[in-house]
């Protein structure tokens, strides 16, 4: 008998645009989606290209439409799940971003964007962000590293 905890219920947002970058010593991924009350919502996910050894600087930084909706180091997990991304935040991170603790980003309307997002997350994971899991996605170039 399996007594594993069930998957938490997640709020789902459909990604309609994606932007990625690799400049100024940073890797970044921006998911564009519509949310309740914000038809042009975004989630920026940012990390440094090389670890500094300073926990606060090496943490994933997330920001929505303004720096008033931002947090650093509050990601429990960011994972490729099926053809989407699953984000788990600490209660503090969820409050700072005004997002649920469990959020899923789907790519049903724009499946080509999913491959780009997964590949960029693999680059972020390769920098050393153990909270990012690409689960062997074909674009995962981390060679099994977390």
Image (cartoon, rainbow, N blue to C red):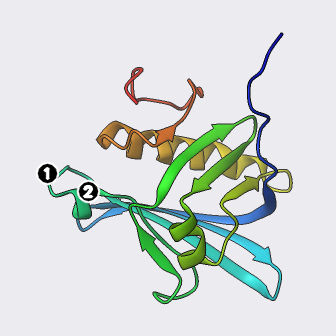
Residue 25 x, y percent position in the rendering = 23, 62
Where residue 86 is drawn, which disc sits there?
none
Q: Is residue 81 above or below residue 69?
A: above
Is 1 in front, or is 101? 1
Residue 104 x, y percent position in the rendering = 73, 54
Residue 38 image-quadrant placement = bottom right
Residue at the (79%, 63%) spot, across then down: 13
Residue at the (30%, 42%) spot, across then down: 127
SS category of the residue bearing label 1: loop
Is 29 in front, or is 145? 145
Residue 84 x, y percent position in the rendering = 72, 45
Residue at the (48%, 47%) spot, across then down: 120
Is 144 in front, or is 75? 75
Tag 2 residue: 58
Report whether 64 appears left or right of 125: right
User: CA–CA distance between discs 2 and 1?
Assistant: 7 Å
Residue 59 x, y percent position in the rendering = 33, 58
Number of other residues with Cα within 10 Å of mark 1, as a class: few under 14, some 14 to 19, many 20 or more: few
Residue at the far top: name it.
1
Is 138 in front, or is 48? 48
Report whether 38 appears left or right of 68: right
Tag 1 residue: 53
């Amino acid at each position: 008998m399996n007594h594993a905890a069930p998957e938490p219920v997640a709020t789902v947002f459909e990604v309609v645009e994606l932007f990625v970058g690799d400049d100024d010593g940073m890797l970044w991924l921006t998911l564009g989606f519509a949310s309740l009350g914000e038809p042009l919502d975004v989630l920026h996910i940012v990390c440094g290209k090389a670890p500094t050894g300073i926990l606060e600087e090496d943490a994933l930084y997330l920001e929505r439409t303004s720096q008033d909706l931002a947090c650093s180091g509050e990601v429990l997990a960011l994972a490729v799940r099926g053809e989407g991304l699953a984000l788990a935040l600490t209660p503090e991170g969820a409050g700072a971003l005004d997002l649920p603790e469990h959020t899923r980003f789907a790519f049903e309307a724009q499946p080509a964007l999913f491959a780009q997002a997964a590949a960029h997350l693999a680059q972020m994971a390769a920098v050393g962000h153990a909270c990012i899991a690409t689960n062997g996605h074909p674009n995962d170039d981390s060679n099994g590293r977390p």
